[in-house]
Structures are given as C-alpha cells and as structure tokens.
Image: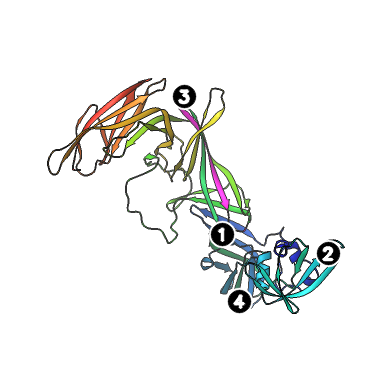
Amino acid sequence: MRSMILLSALLAGSALAQPAPNTIPPPSQSAQGDVAVTIYNGDLALVQDTRQLDIPAGRSRQEFPDVSAQIRPETVTLSGAGVGIVEQNFDFDLLSPQALMEKAVGETITLVRTNPATGAEVRERARVLAANGGVVLQIGDRIEVLRDDGLPVRVIFDRVPENLRARPTLSVTVQSERAGRRPVTLTYLSAGLGWSADYVALFDESNGRMDVQGWITLTNNSGTPYVNANTLLVAGAVGAGNQQPNYGGRQQGPIRNPGTETSNRERLGDFYLYPLAARTTIANRQTKQVSFLDVHGTPAARAYEYDNAWLGTTEQPVSANTVLRFSSSRDQGLGDALPAGTVRVYQRDARGNPQFVGESQIGHTPMGSELGLTTGQAFDVKVRAVVERRERVNSDRWRTTMRYTLTNARPNPVTVDLLQSGLWGDARIAEESMASTRRSADEALWRVPVPANGEATVTATFDTRF
C-alpha cells in the first residue's frame, strides 16, 4: 500500500511536534564504542563492545543501540567498575512502515490525500482498526479500507511507539555504586556472522606445480554493522550446545592422509586463530574477503580414480574421477593448516588464459595432510566393471569373478587408482591379475597403468559371505 511504502512520509509533518520518548540516533552515526568481534565457523560470533557511559548512582536504565539484531539475550554480560545488571530487555521490533502501521492499531492517525488535478490537500483523522493483510480505518461514521488506488495519499503518525526502534537496542537496568562516566563492556553471542575459506588454485600440469591464493570470506547478515572492529576468526567446530558427539566412521572427503604437523599460527584450545591485520568495518549484508594464504610453485599432480561400490556390473563405461593431489606439509606443500572452504582450480589454455576446471570442498585440514580433490569426471578415461561369473561355493560363501576394463583416449599414458569397495566381513581376494593393496578392511586398490590411446584390464576373484 502507498501508505506503507512512503517511509519518509510516515515520519514527516506536524505529527512530529509531539516528540517520541526515545531518541533515534542519526543513521550516519553508530552508538557502538570500541568493538571486537570474534567470528566462528557455523553462524556464530562473540561481540565485545566497550562504550563510555554516564551512569548515575543507584538504579538506572541504560540503552545500547546498534547491537546485533540476532543477539542471543541469554548470553549478555555487562562489566564496568561498580556496575551490576538488574534487568535487561532486547527490543528487536524495528521501525518500518508496516511495523509502524501495526503498532498504530487502536490509535488515531492523519490521512493526507492530494487532488492530482489541483494539488489541494485534504486531511482527515482516522482510527486504525486493523492492519492484518490490509489497513482498516474508521473515519467519522464510516469504515474504510486503505488501498493503493493510484491517488496520492500519505499517513502521518502522532508519535513513534516506545517499543519500536530504528535500530536493534538492548535496554539494561543497572545498579551503580557511584555516579560518573566510565567504560562499560557489553559482551554477547550472536548469529548472523560467519566465515569460510575460499581457495584459488592455478595448476601447471606440465611442470607439476600449483599456485594457491587463500581468501577468508566474511559475511554479515546480523542486521547491524560493526564499525572499525578488531576482528578475529576462529577455525574449527565450536560446540553450540546442539551437536552430537562424533563416534567415528568411514572417512569421506579429500583428506587421503591426515597431517601430523603443527602450524605456526596462534591457537586457542583446539582451534586456530586468523586475526585480520587491521581494524575493519563489517557492514550489514556485506561479504568481505581478506587474503590469508599466498603460495607459489607447490608440488601438485593430476590423478584418476574410480570406485566400484559393490561387486556388480556397470551397464556402460563410467568416467574416472579427475583428482588434483597435493600436500599441506611445510616442506613439500602449502605449509599451513587449511580452514574449511572451497578450492576452485584453474588451468591455462593453449593461449595462456586461465580457465576454470573444477572445484571441491575441503574440511578443516591439519598441516602435513595429503589431499586429493575431485574436480570433475574425465572425458577420455573410462572404466567398466563386469561380473564374469558368480557362483555359490557353499551355504555361507560366494565366489565372484570381476573384470575391469580401463580405456584411455588421451595422447599420454595415465595411471588409474581402481578401488573395489564393499568387501565387508571376511571377504578375501582368491585370485587377481595384478597385485592389489588393502586400503581398508573393505577396500582393495589397484594402481593400473593405462597406455596412451589404449586400454588395460584387471581381473580378480573374490571369496565373500554374500
């Protein structure tokens, strides 16, 4: 509705002759003081805001505008010399045309209609009866529905309701031993702030090298900007009270061998800290990126992997996964602990232009880890698994003979890591055409060389319970 769209009209006019009991600070100014923000993975942040306040002796109410709109009020603490909290209230109902109209139900407002032909204004006093899906007014003896009919109309309110704030505001009743101006620190947890890592990798396949740029991507959707904040990022899974313990299980993802090296970065308990080098303003609804990793010429190689999930036949040849292998070790890798995020991989084409060739997610990765990022499926490298024979040995055992055909249309030879998984229980390999290794209790691995423009075959017979 036109009356609910024109915010400037809602707050303008002679209606403001009756001042609101709460002063609305200018939009260009922040009421925050010295702000420090610690941001965790998983939509959680710790805000510490030190403000200079004039506090009278005894009991008084202190208001803290510009707190997070997603503050967790139960986590609020207030510390200051001789100051204690008696009561606190968080007013999260923010000033907007719709909220202003909803709060005016039962109140009297002024309608201003303008004749489009003459420009003459007509003012009427009206009582708001309802603002649920539309505005219902009582004007004198008639009931009228305020609608957007193309005629110029605006609404003037007599005042701003006391519990409707222009900014998220925390009201705290404090007890002070003495009067005077002093620093007071407000500390609370909030949702709406989070960060992740983004990595840009430029892979030089011919030289077996890779350049990696790491970016911290910081996002603020908390409803409040944080002005000139001292910002610290914490990498790791911080418990938030609703997490279930991890009892282990089969490892998934790109970490092929977890590292055992300790990074030189500052630690806090089991977490790594990534402080921003300078204070920064984190605007609301903003994404900010800061570089934290810049490595050139780290060893890297392309590999191919195929995992046959069970002893079954694939109807068509299936593309092998394209995998980028590298290390995060100090001596032969990136030399850092890697916070969780997305790795985007580029390669230069024949004209020297970098082109996007795939991306993969990584979890929190300790330094010294061996990684294999699946960036896509190979166009020219295919695998087909076929059950050649399956027979029952006795009531408890089966014998299955598999044939794996690997083809390579590339002009250079490749090696494919052929993985047969699903070998549960006491499964064993009775015969095989080339030696395998058991990567785990239920996985057998063959490293199969496939010639350029050629094919290779692996056969194996499995003795299984099923």
Image quadrant of residue 424? top left
- Give me the residue at 12% from left, 44% from top: 395
> Residue type at mark 2?
Asn
Ranked by sequence position, the earlier of labels 3 and 1 is: 1
**What mark, if any, has residue 47 been given in the picture?**
1
Q: Position of residue 44 (x, y in %)?
A: 51, 57
Q: Is residue 95 visible?
A: no
Question: Any magenta on residue 123?
Answer: no
Q: Are marks 1 and 4 in contact (CB under 8 Å)?
A: no
Q: Position of residue 36 (x, y in %)?
A: 58, 56
Q: CA distance from mark 3 to mark 2?
A: 77 Å
Foreground residue among 58 and 249? 249
Query: Tell me, what colour scheme is on the image?
Result: rainbow
Q: Position of residue 349 (x, y in %)?
A: 53, 25
Ranked by sequence position, the earlier of labels 2 and 4 is: 2
**What mark, if any, has residue 115 been given in the picture?**
2
The 10 Å Cα crowd at callout 4, few under 14, some 14 to 19, many 20 or more, is some
Q: Is residue 190 left or right of residue 361?
A: right
Ranked by sequence position, the earlier of labels 1 and 4 is: 1
| Dot 2: element | loop
Q: Are marks 2 and 4 in contact (CB under 8 Å)?
A: no
The 10 Å Cα crowd at callout 1, few under 14, some 14 to 19, many 20 or more, is many
- Give me the residue at 27% from left, 27% from top: 458
Q: Which residue is mark 3?
A: 207
Q: Which residue is mark 4?
A: 177
Q: Nearer the viewer, mark 3 or mark 1?
A: 3
| Dot 3: element | loop
> Residue type at mark 1?
Val
